[in-house]
Every structure is written in C-alpha cells, then in structure tokens.
Image: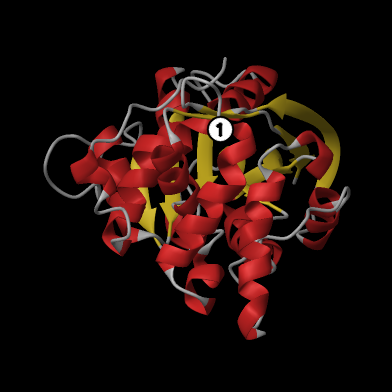
C-alpha cells in the first residue's frame, strides 16, 4: 500500500500556511498518511485484530489507531500534543463528550504521561506501539525511553512492543530535505533539540536495551512521500516538528523557502513531489 498524493491546496489555504495553529491539521490531512504502509506492515506481521489490546505512544491524530480499530483491536492512544489529540478524538470518538468512563472496548484517547492509560477493565495491554520514527531529532530517544518506562507496567509479561525509525539515509530521498533543518538549526548554536539528525543503524536496538526490552525481529517498509505540489510538501514536512528548531533559529518564511528549494530535485513534470523512503521497525518483548 502506498500513500496517495495529497489534494492540491488552494491559494487561500497556502497563504495561511505560516500560522502555527495550522500545523496539526497539516499533519492529519497531509503528512500522517505517508506512514500508512508502516502501520499496515506491522499490523500484518503481528496479526493485529480482535482480541488485540493496543496502547499507542504518541498516537498523534489517530490514523494508526483507526486502522487497528478497523481490524477489531481495542485501542488506547496517548499524546502530549493537544491539537493532534483533538483531531484523533474527531476521528475515533465522533460523538460529543469526554472519552472518560466509556465501555472497555471503546477507543480511549488520553493526554500526558502513558501511566494514565491504565486499562479501563484492568486487563493488561499485549501490544505497545511507538510509530513516531526515532533517530530524527537529538532528544527523541530520551523522551521515548521515559514514555516506555511509564507504559511497560501496564502491559502483560511477554507483550510485544514495536519501535520505529528512519531507514539508512541513502535509502531515504527525504534525507537531504531534512538536512535543511539541521543546517538552519546550527546557525544560532542553540541546544540540539527539535532538529533532524542522521539516524544510526543500531538506534532502535540501543533504545530497546535502555528501556529494558528484548529485540526479537525487525523489518523495513517502503514509505514514499507523495504530494500534489510543492506547497503541500512544505506544509506536510513542517508539520512533522522536525523543523521547529530551524524556525526558532531563523524564521518560518526562511525555512519554507529553503525546504521548497531542497524539494526541487523531487518535482516531477506534472508538478507533483515524489520521494521514496524506507522506514525500519523493531519488534521487542517485555
């Protein structure tokens, strides 16, 4: 399965793309779908379906949860981004009101620390996923280790945990575009947080050992990034948070300009943007 090209953005939409409040919708409408092949590959390998009790760390706007729920899984998502989580609630909990106190089989979406995601019926989770790819920013591993340590007590012994990351830079056409974030972030010599870095081959294994997990399998999945035009590509990429440090070091207009320039080699004759990428996942047990 490959992501479809996102719809063309109108001039009225693109003229507001610099507004910070647009970032969560840009993620949900443009960028999140690019990782759908990764979600599907993991769920196929683990035979996610009825009976699966899934806890998603950093669930974002909920696409991976929606796919798992459609397979029959009981899903719970946790995130600290209130705007993305609000969009996830719209997708998974369309009726008005809080998701607190819902029946045990109903999707649950919670804000903050994963320790708050204790199963409503007391039955432990048997699958924990972290689909936000690590090995991108300079502090993402630290945050994920902390989240895993909070979440693991909620899972049954021998449960499955899935970690994900970018593949080798030479297999990721998006890597040179993401290096714009690294280069611009260096300008102010600020602490190296929030920007992109080249991922290491053993990043996932090192993180698993730090969290007390036992790796027992891995895989690679092609996740091409396809956009209807350059404006859509810029909006989608900036919604990932990987350019936040670059925006702080310069300004958003400068970052948008340089990202658009970096996208030029990937622009096809019809104006669409196409960048093949490979992502890696690591299957672990508690």
Q: Is residue 96 above or below residue 63?
A: below
Q: In front here: 238 or 11?
A: 11
Q: How is the image coloured?
A: secondary structure
Closest to the observer, 64 or 286:
64
Give percent across and percent down for residue 122.
Answer: 46, 46
What x and y, as percent, mark residue 234? Answer: 46, 47
* Residue 60 seen: no
The part of the image, by quadrant, that contains residue 82 is bottom left
Q: x, y percentage for residue 48? A: 57, 22
Placement of 188 over or under 266, stated as above or below: below
Residue at the (61%, 48%) spot, across then down: 262
Residue at far left of view: 96
Q: Quadrant of the N terminus?
A: top right
Q: Is residue 142 left or right of residue 71?
A: right
- Dot 1: element: helix
The residue positioned 53% from the left and 27% from the top of the image is 36
Residue 212's spot in the image, x, y percent? 79, 57
Question: How many circles with numbers are drawn on the protein?
Answer: 1
Which residue ends up furthest to the top in the rendered image? 1
Residue 280 found in image quarter: top right
> Residue sitting at 55 percent across and 71 percent down?
245
Left or right of 199 in this view: 231: left
Q: Quadrant of the rendered structure where residue 91 is?
A: top left
Q: Which residue is mark 1?
A: 35
Residue 97 seen in render: yes
Few, some or many residues within 10 Å of mark 1 (<14, 14–19, 20+): many
């Amino acid at each position: 399965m490959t992501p479809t090209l996102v719809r063309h953005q109108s001039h009225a939409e693109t003229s507001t793309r610099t507004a910070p409040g647009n970032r969560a919708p840009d993620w949900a409408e443009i960028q999140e779908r690019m990782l759908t092949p990764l979600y599907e590959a993991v769920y196929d390998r683990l035979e996610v379906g009825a009976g699966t009790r899934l806890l998603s760390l950093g669930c974002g706007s909920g696409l991976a949860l929606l796919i798992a729920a459609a397979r029959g899984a009981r899903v719970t998502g946790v995130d600290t981004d209130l705007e993305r989580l609000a969009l996830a609630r719209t997708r998974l909990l369309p009726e008005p009101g809080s998701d607190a106190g819902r029946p045990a089989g109903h999707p649950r979406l919670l804000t903050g620390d994963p320790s708050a995601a204790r199963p409503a019926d007391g039955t432990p989770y048997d699958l924990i996923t972290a689909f936000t790819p690590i090995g991108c920013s300079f502090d993402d591993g630290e945050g994920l280790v902390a989240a895993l340590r909070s979440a693991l007590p909620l899972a049954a012994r021998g449960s499955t945990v899935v970690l994900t990351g970018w593949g080798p830079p030479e297999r990721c056409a998006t890597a040179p575009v993401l290096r714009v974030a690294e280069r611009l972030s260096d300008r102010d010599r600020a602490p190296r947080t929030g920007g992109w870095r080249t991922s290491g081959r053993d990043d996932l294994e090192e993180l698993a050992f730090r969290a007390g997990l036992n790796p027992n399998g891995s895989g690679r999945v092609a996740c091409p990034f396809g956009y209807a035009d350059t404006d859509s590509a810029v909006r989608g990429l900036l919604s990932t948070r990987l350019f936040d440090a670059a925006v702080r070091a310069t300004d958003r207009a400068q970052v948008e300009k340089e990202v658009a320039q970096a996208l030029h080699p990937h622009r096809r004759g019809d104006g669409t943007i196409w960048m093949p990428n490979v992502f890696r996942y690591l299957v672990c047990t508690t």
